[in-house]
Amino acid sequence: MQAEFDFEEIKEIVQLAIKEDIGDGDITSNIFIPDDSESEGALIAKEAGIVAGLPVAGYVLLQIDKDLIFTSNIEDGSRVERGTEIARVKGLTISLLSAERVVLNFLQRLSGIATATNRFAEKVKGYKAQIMDTRKTTPGWRYLEKYAVRVGGGVNHRMGLYDHILIKDNHLKIMESEKENGAIVRLVKKARKQIENGTLIEAEVEDLSQVKDVADAGVDIILFDNIEPSKIRKAINMVKEYEKNQGARTGKAILTEASGNITIQNVEDYAKAGVDRISVGAITHSARALDISFEIS
């Protein structure tokens, strides 16, 4: 799956990666490799998976040596098998050796996330549920990791705390401890007055008894956190009944989302329950890097 990519978002992280790995130069290659030596190398998949990060790989190479020639054999989102030649790089040997680890670090990490996401997405194929990421990302890598999620067939949740309101149990507890009126209806009304049109408001419920209050509050999304699929199915029926009674007046549907302890083994159960969205932290925080090697011919 092709996904939009903004190179402005990765300038700092790429320069940091180059600085921490190459520093003042690859002293081993500088000592043993002639300055004018040229080589060609290939990025080879060592296992099956979904490739993500080719635009990043090309960008990294150009930052190290603008004369390097990078040729992709596939596009981001392509499924590869063991032994697939993903891309080739040609240029000064010292530049190739210097760039190798930085390129692989980006490509393997992002491909791992895309592969993990795709496994979840395939499990819910045929259901309306979308696989979504969370804010459980590597510090500094959020744009890149959320890009990889899209490449793998997932959908991005909020980018940060600034673009989507999510009222969680801790917010309600703190409001209560501060002797504020923590009623969800009041909180949502307060939020609506202070946010721009189009900003989504989501509220977490941990028990079915909270569903009607949250729906009455006028939220856009109800988040079922750590609730088993059978109970979520009942909750969704409650939401549908609420919409049936209120729909003519409000004119909008409430989206539903499941989160908390979602695994590859149980994700389909949540999709069967009828949720619109399933947020999975594991696709970013626990994704294993895809095994890719760089081999000079």
Image: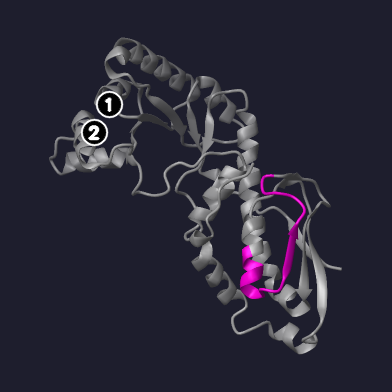
Residue 105 in sight: no
Residue occupying the far bottom of the picture: 31
Three-letter amino acid code at the position of disc 1: Gly
User: Quadrant location of the N terminus?
Assistant: top right
In primary-sequence order, the first of circles 2 and 1 is 2
Badge 2 element: helix
| Residue drawn at (76%, 61%) of the image | 293
Q: How crowded is mark 2: few (under 14 residues within 10 Å), some or many (20 or more)?
A: many
Q: Would you place residue 268 above or below residue 16 in this image?
A: above
User: Quadrant location of the C terminus?
Assistant: bottom right
**Location of residue 190 (image quadrant):** top left
Q: Are marks 2 and 1 in contact (CB under 8 Å)?
A: yes
Q: Position of residue 171 (x, y in %)?
A: 26, 41
Q: Which mark is residue 218?
A: 1
Q: Would you place residue 238 above or below residue 130 in this image?
A: above
- Asked if residue 199 lies in the magenta stretch, the reply is no
Q: Would you place residue 232 above or below residue 23 in this image?
A: above
Q: Position of residue 203 (x, y in %)?
A: 33, 33
Asked whether 3 or 244 is in front, the reply is: 3
Residue 77 in sight: yes
Three-letter amino acid code at the position of disc 2: Val
Q: Is residue 76 left or right of residue 268?
A: right
Residue topped by disc 2: 188
**Location of residue 86 (image quadrant):** bottom right
Q: How crowded is mark 1: few (under 14 residues within 10 Å), some or many (20 or more)?
A: many
* Region rendered in magenta: 59-77
| Residue drawn at (34%, 21%) of the image | 252
Residue occupying the far right of the picture: 297
